[in-house]
Amino acid sequence: MHRLPRRTVLAAGLTLAASLSAAACSADTNSSDGPTTPDGYTLTEVPDFDFSLAVPTDWTTLTHDDLDDDELVATVAEALGQDADSLRDTADTFHLISVDADTTGYAENLAVSQYELEDGLPPAEELAEVTDDDQVSSSDHAQRTTGSGADAVLYTASGTLSGSGEAFHIAFMAVSMDAGATASADAATAPSTATFVMIRAASADRAQELADVVLGSV
């Protein structure tokens, strides 16, 4: 697992956001009943680290373990508007990608990465940097709690991509993997592990829906 400054991770998020594309504060929303996976979703494990999340059952999922599967890589790449080589070239920016490869419309997708951060879980305002170069028409950020009680931050936004002029709707979250850490001098200076999930959806409501399901399943 990479140990990186928060700013470096957010820069990687910018790269990932670009590869997957062809601020008022909201109230805190908490999950308290334990992780849940709704009907129509499958709890999917991310290889090589302790993290699972709910993804739509009919989506196609690619992980680092699948990069030698030419047919699967080609399917995911085509759905994302890329070629297989370009997708493999960005493999260091994600651990899992899941995409609605069978749709005839916008191919909704999500990507997951995990890092050890030198300076803790980023505030939601920093997550907003992934849209700094785009025209944002609406955005929201919130402190959240996952289904298992872990701390998380969520940034949602809609607008127009600066390069293509296409509309976008995203949800970008960071989930702390350090639940149960004690408040001590050593804990305060120890690296913090965080999982980042970037969601791109066909509408703002859909991006929020997917984000809520992911957070509730973790």
Image (spheres, rainbow, N blue to C red):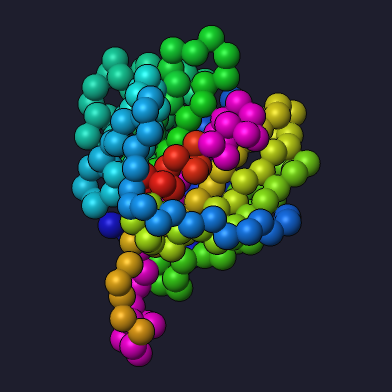
Task: Point out residue 190 in the picture as x, y percentages from the top left corner.
Answer: 33, 78
66 vs 150, nearest the viewer? 150
Res 47 → quadrant: top left
Q: Residue furthest front?
A: 33
Task: Give me the residue at 54% from left, 55% from top.
Answer: 29
Image x and y of residue 160, in percent: 73, 34
Who's the residue at 75% across and 44% down the image? Answer: 138
Q: Nearer the viewer, residue 197 or 18?
A: 197
Quadrant where the N terminus lies? bottom left
Residue 18 seen by the camera: no
Q: Residue at x 34, y 43 (%)?
A: 36
Along the viewing direction, whichever of 26 and 130 lies nearer the viewer: 26
Q: Residue furthest bottom?
A: 185
Answer left or right for 37 relative to 25.
left
Magenta stretch holds residue 97: no
Q: Residue at x 24, y 29 (%)?
A: 66
Vertical placement of 218 versus 126: above or below? Answer: above
Estimate the x, y position of residue 74 in percent, counting from the top left.
36, 17
Left or right relative to 202: residue 87: left
- What is the x, y in percent for residue 126? 60, 61
Asked if residue 205 is among those painted magenta in the image, a careful observer would answer: yes
Q: Is residue 170 visible?
A: yes
Range covered by the magenta-colored residues: 184-209
Looking at the picture, does residue 40 appear above or below residue 124? above
Q: How many marks are shown on the rendered structure? A: 0
Question: Compared with residue 90, is residue 28 higher up or lower down, i.e. above or below?
Answer: below
Quarter-wise, where is residue 149 in the image? bottom left
